């Protein structure tokens, strides 16, 4: 197999990107160092915008099936898990607000990744485990990726290599890209454990249980028997020694739970350092970075993985445009510029939470406004047709399998001209300039006659939007303004 794109790393970002590229008929090879997927549930909060990406991939329902119930998406604060006095926050109100067809969920990364892997493979990607990449070289017109497999050295060539290989990315290193920011904001021992806590949390089910007195907290995996206990490692402690001592680990968990007799099975441990780091660029030649390889966000906003999923979405359609000969490689510089600004803004928001406590803002990334400075703010989401914003979600009908049909479901994942009602002139322009054409409604009159809701996203008659493959609006075009279309298309395609 000669892949067009090699993705290094089968974490959530590499697997999402593999699915998005395979759906666009691009030959993908994913090389993953480990023998299988990560067993440790790290990220758990999948926000609304990521769920919209998963909806476009066709895995939204599969992800929901392995997620916690919505009512559990709230925070618990008390001295111990079993304390009689405790405080619970409210669940996010995304469901009722109607800003998205796909509200966020709480799904452990170790349950999410198998769903993404199965989809990527079905869509046509090749995923090779036990393949540690040891060398990446940009040869000008292609890349060469060297890796070890079963003790043997192998290599593969491709048009591009995407580093989805996490915080210690070898692709980033090979590209000579530096990181700027803060490291070691805190150090945690993450203990993956099984313990019968169903009855203990029955009246207080939450996603994160913050405990007093420097005890850290519990993170729910299933809110029954499967848990993570996060222990903030004090300065100077020999954490490796602690990791090897099952008795001490069990004791830490019992103290946190406030249950001295609790039956605890330690499954796994990992140490992680809270960092706030941003790569100096996400692109160098044919080497491109996405996810933690490009940015490390403190998990205090629950957005590290979500920003990475946004990277994959922002990159996939651009790669397809370039590989299809419709866009120049300058679009990768746009990718780097836009996504760095998003990561910077989310890092800043998450750093604010480090001192002010953890926060869940399921809609934060729905409001991403490319071109604005900063492109992400903590302001409540409000739908907009401004250039740079994601096309607003409006229910436009019903569809088998997904129920309510959203405006977002109509987008083709590539550049498209979007109008409210069918418009022959814009349809012809779309054909002439090689983009898709999407009328959001077949006919206002017909829908009214059938008792339809006749919804509108707010475009005037004859107006159109040029919408990118990631659902963001490139331009709002007045009736018949083909010149503006031509100039916006040239810009969007890096011409
Ligand atoms: C405790 C904790 C809680 C978190 N909570 C949240 C949350 O609630 N929400 C959220 O959005 N984010 C959260 N995060 C962040 C989230 O886990 C990361 O942002 C996410 O895992 C990044 O995904 P990735 O695919 O970029 O990298 P990773 O998940 O790190 O995957 C990288 C993959 O690349 C592989 N790899 C590395 N080097 C090589 C090589 N040389 N060759 C081949 N393969 C290689 C690795 O084995 C790995 O499988 C949390 C993180 C932690 C530690």
Image: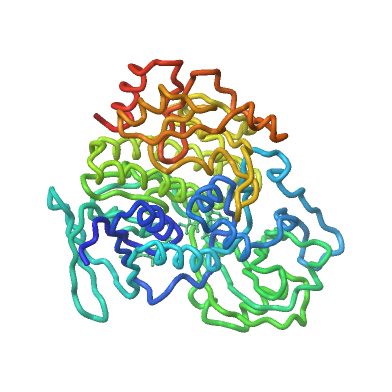
Q: Is residue 209 visible?
A: no
Picture coordinates of residue 429, whole percent (x, y): 35, 25
Tell me how the rendering is colored. Answer: rainbow
Relative to 455, residue 48 above or below: below
In the rendered image, the residue lying farthest to the right is 84
Where does the C terminus fall, quadrant-wise?
A: top left
Q: Is residue 321 visible?
A: yes
* Residue under the image location 45 percent in, 63 percent down: 119
Give the x, y percent position of residue 39.
Answer: 50, 73
> In which of the image's four quarters is ligand 1 placed?
bottom left
Residue 470 placement (x, y as % from top left): 44, 41
Write the residue at 62% across / 35% down.
394
Residue in the foreground of this view, choosing between 28 and 354: 28
Near-viewer residue (490 or 479): 479
Q: How many marks?
A: 0
Q: Is 376 situated left or right of 249 in this image? A: left
**Foreground: 258 or 455?**
455
The image position of residue 64, as x and y in percent, is 62, 60
Please tell me which residue is depicted at 45% across the width and 71% down the height of the picture. 37
Quick one: quadrant of the N terminus? bottom left
Residue 163 quadrant: bottom left
Q: In the drawing, does residue 20 fall left or right of residue 214? A: left
Q: Which residue is pictured at 62% across the width and 27% down the height?
A: 444
Q: Nearer the viewer, residue 229 or 140?
A: 140
Identify the image quadrant of residue 189. bottom right
């Amino acid at each position: 197999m000669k892949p067009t794109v090699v993705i290094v790393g089968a974490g959530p970002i590499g697997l999402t990107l593999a699915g998005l590229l395979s759906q666009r008929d691009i030959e993908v090879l994913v090389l993953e160092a480990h023998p299988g997927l990560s067993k440790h549930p790290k990220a758990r909060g999948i926000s609304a915008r990521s769920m919209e990406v998963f909806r476009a991939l066709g895995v939204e329902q599969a992800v929901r099936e392995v997620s916690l119930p919505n009512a559990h998406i709230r925070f618990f604060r008390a001295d111990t898990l079993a304390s009689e006095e405790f405080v619970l926050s409210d669940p996010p109100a995304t469901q009722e607000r109607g800003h998205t067809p796909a509200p966020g969920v709480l799904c452990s990364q170790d349950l999410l990744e198998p769903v993404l892997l199965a989809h990527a493979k079905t869509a046509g990607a090749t995923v090779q485990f036990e393949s540690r990449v040891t060398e990446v070289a940009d040869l000008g017109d292609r890349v060469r990726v060297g890796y070890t497999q079963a003790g043997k050295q192998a290599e593969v060539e491709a048009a591009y290599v995407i580093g989805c290989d996490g915080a210690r990315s070898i692709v980033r290193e090979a590209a000579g890209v530096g990181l700027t920011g803060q490291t070691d904001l805190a150090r945690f021992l993450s203990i993956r454990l099984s313990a019968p806590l169903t009855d203990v949390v029955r009246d207080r089910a939450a996603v994160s249980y913050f405990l007093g007195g420097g005890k850290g907290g519990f993170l729910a995996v299933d809110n029954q028997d499967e848990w993570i206990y996060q222990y903030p490692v004090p300065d100077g402690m020999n954490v490796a020694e602690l990791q090897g001592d099952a008795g001490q680990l069990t004791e830490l968990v019992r103290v946190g739970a406030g249950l001295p007799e609790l039956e605890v099975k330690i499954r796994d441990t990992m140490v992680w350092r809270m960092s706030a780091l941003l790569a100096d660029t996400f692109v160098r030649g044919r080497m491109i970075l996405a996810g933690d390889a490009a940015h490390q966000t403190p998990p205090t906003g629950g957005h590290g993985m979500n920003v990475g999923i946004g990277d994959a979405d922002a990159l996939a359609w651009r790669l397809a445009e370039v590989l299809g000969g419709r866009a120049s490689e300058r679009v990768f510089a746009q990718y780097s510029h836009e996504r760095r600004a998003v990561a910077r803004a989310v890092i800043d928001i998450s750093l604010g939470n480090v001192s002010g406590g953890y926060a869940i803002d399921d809609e934060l990334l729905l409001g991403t406004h490319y071109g604005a400075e900063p492109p992400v703010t903590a302001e409540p989401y409000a739908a907009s047709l401004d250039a740079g914003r994601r096309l607003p979600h409006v229910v436009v009908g019903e569809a088998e399998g997904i129920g309510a049909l959203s405006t977002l479901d109509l987008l083709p994942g590539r550049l498209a001209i979007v109008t409210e009602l069918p418009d022959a002139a814009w349809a012809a322009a779309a054909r002439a300039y090689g983009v898709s054409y999407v009328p959001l409604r077949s006919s206002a009159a017909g829908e009214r006659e059938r008792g339809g809701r006749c919804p509108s996203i707010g475009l005037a008659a004859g107006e159109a939007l040029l919408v990118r493959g990631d659902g963001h609006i490139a331009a709002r075009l007045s009736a018949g303004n083909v010149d503006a279309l031509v100039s916006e298309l040239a810009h969007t395609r890096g011409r």
